[in-house]
Image (cartoon, grey):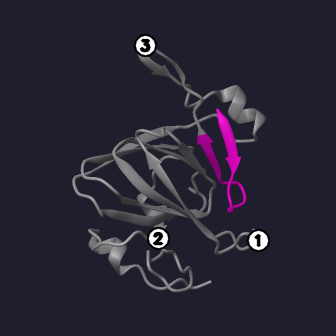
């Protein structure tokens, strides 16, 4: 696996290194020893999938508050997404910085998202599925979010009419 630093402190883009032959290819997407060597978590306690029928489905920007703050490992298993991580850690040198990544079933890249960073994605194809692995179980009482198009962040999303939940559309502007 290739671990690449991002513009967000602690966020890491992970690319597989496929071994190919006439049958196809094989690639490792997680190895506890390699993650530990990069100071990334090795214990994920919950996995979930998000299936999205239509292109331009936007989910996010979500995070969990303490004491249920979670770290996430995100991978697109079918289709393609524009995946966004936004740093909400006030003490971080990358506070309020965002970065977007194209994760596809084809490129098999994963994105590690540190705790206290908001996460969201926009599907780029119909029938897109995303696999989440989390270090902390989902806690509805600690679930929160920020508005996807808040001018305080200046996130540049791919063009197109967005399909989203009422909850995600109603998040207020960020209050530092």
Mark 2 touching mark 1, by CB under 8 A?
A: no
Of the two numbered discs 2 and 3 in the rendering, the one whose residue sits closer to the viewer: 3
Could you tell which of marks 2 and 3 lies nearer the N-terminus?
A: 3
Residue 86 visible in the shown view: no
User: Element at badge 3?
Assistant: loop
Q: Is residue 144 above or below residue 147?
A: above
| Label 2 sits on residue | 145
| Relative image position of residue 117 (x, y in whole percent) | 60, 63
| Label 1 sits on residue | 91
Q: Is residue 123 above or below residue 169?
A: above
Residue at image coords 56%, 37%: 44
Q: Nearest the camera: 167 or 124? A: 124
Q: Count the marks: how many?
A: 3
| Label 3 sits on residue | 22
Image quadrant assignment for residue 114: bottom right
Q: Nearest the camera: 142 or 99? A: 99
User: Element at badge 2?
Assistant: strand
Residue at image coords 72%, 69%: 94
| Relative image position of residue 12 (x, y in whole percent) | 65, 49
Q: Residues within 10 Å of mark 1 (few under 14, many from 20)?
A: few
Q: Is residue 113 above or below residue 88?
A: above
Could you tell which of marks 3 and 1 lies nearer the N-terminus?
A: 3
Could you tell which of marks 2 and 1 lies nearer the N-terminus?
A: 1
Q: Does the magenta stretch include residue 11?
A: yes
Query: Which residue of the protein is positioned furthest toward the left in this rendering?
Result: 53
Residue 95 visible in the shown view: yes
Q: In this view, does 128 lie above or below 119?
A: above
Tell me the magenta residue range.
Answer: 1-14
Q: Is residue 149 magenta?
A: no
């Amino acid at each position: 696996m290739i671990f690449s630093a991002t513009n967000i402190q602690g966020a890491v883009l992970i690319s597989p290194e496929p071994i190919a032959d006439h049958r196809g290819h094989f690639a490792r997407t997680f190895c506890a020893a390699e993650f530990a060597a990069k100071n990334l978590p090795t214990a994920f306690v919950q996995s979930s999938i998000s299936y999205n029928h239509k292109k331009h489905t936007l989910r996010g920007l979500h995070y969990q508050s303490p004491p249920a703050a979670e770290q996430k490992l995100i991978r697109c298993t079918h289709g393609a997404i524009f995946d966004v991580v936004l740093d909400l850690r006030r003490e971080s040198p990358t506070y309020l910085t965002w970065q977007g990544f194209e994760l596809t079933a084809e490129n098999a890249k994963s994105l590690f998202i540190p705790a206290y960073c908001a996460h969201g994605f926009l599907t780029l194809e119909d029938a897109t599925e995303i696999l989440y692995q989390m270090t902390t179980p989902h806690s509805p009482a600690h679930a929160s979010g920020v508005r996807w198009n808040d001018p305080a962040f200046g996130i540049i999303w791919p063009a197109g009419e967005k399909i989203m939940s009422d909850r995600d559309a109603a998040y207020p502007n960020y209050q530092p």
